[in-house]
Amino acid sequence: LTIMGPSGAGKTTLLNALTLEDTTGTCYGSITLNGKPLTRELFLQNCFYVPQYPALYAFLTPRETLIITAKLFASQSSTDTDAIIEARVNTLLEVMGLQSCADIKIGNEFFLGLSGGQ
C-alpha cells in the first residue's frame, strides 16, 4: 500500500486512524480488516507500519544496516556465515525493491541520502 499526496492532504491523519494512533479530534466511520473491526490486537497480529523517518543510522546504507542488525540478533550458537547473512540480506533487499539504493547512505536532515519514500 502506498499513500501519496501533497502536503496537507491528510496522509498522516489517515495513517494515524488506520494504525489506531489518532488520539485527537473525532473520527467517523469504521475500519475493518478482513471483515473484522480493527482492534489494537488485530492490528499488531496482521499489520506493520514503517514511518517515513525511522530511527536508522544516517551514515550507514540499507545493506549495512540489515547486515549489522542480522549479526546483532543472531544467537551465539548460530552457524550462519557472513556469506549466508549477506545472501539473506540481498534477498530481503530484492523483495523490498531496494536493490537500486542498497548502497546509498541513509542520510538525515544534515546530509543528503535516501529519499523518504525509499
Image: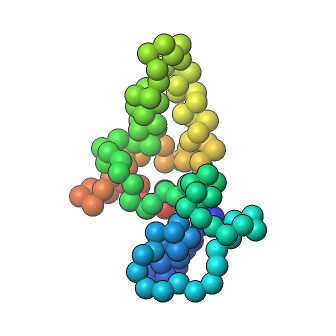
Q: Out of 35 and 97, give the one closest to the viewer.
A: 35
Tell me where residue 90 appears, x and y as whole percent: 57, 34
Question: Would residue 92 be visible to someone looking at this image?
Answer: yes
Is 68 drawn above or below residue 29 in the view shown? above
Outermost residue, left side: 110
Q: Is residue 41 left or right of residue 71?
A: right
Q: Quadrant of residue 84?
A: top right
Specify how the rendered protein is coloured.
rainbow
Question: In which quadrant of the rendered image does the N terminus lie?
Answer: bottom right
Is 77 drawn above or below residue 107 in the view shown? above
Question: Would residue 6 be visible to someone looking at this image?
Answer: no
Tell me where residue 20 appears, x and y as whole percent: 51, 69
Q: Is residue 25 left or right of residue 93?
A: left
Q: Residue at x 45, y 60 (%)?
A: 51
Q: Quadrant of residue 103?
A: top left
Q: Residue at x 44, y 15 (%)?
A: 76
Tell me where residue 18 appears, x and y as whole percent: 56, 70
Is 76 drawn above or below residue 37 in the view shown? above
Q: Residue at x 38, y 59 (%)?
A: 53
Tell me where residue 85 appears, x and y as whole percent: 52, 25
Q: Give the tally of numbered discs.
A: 0
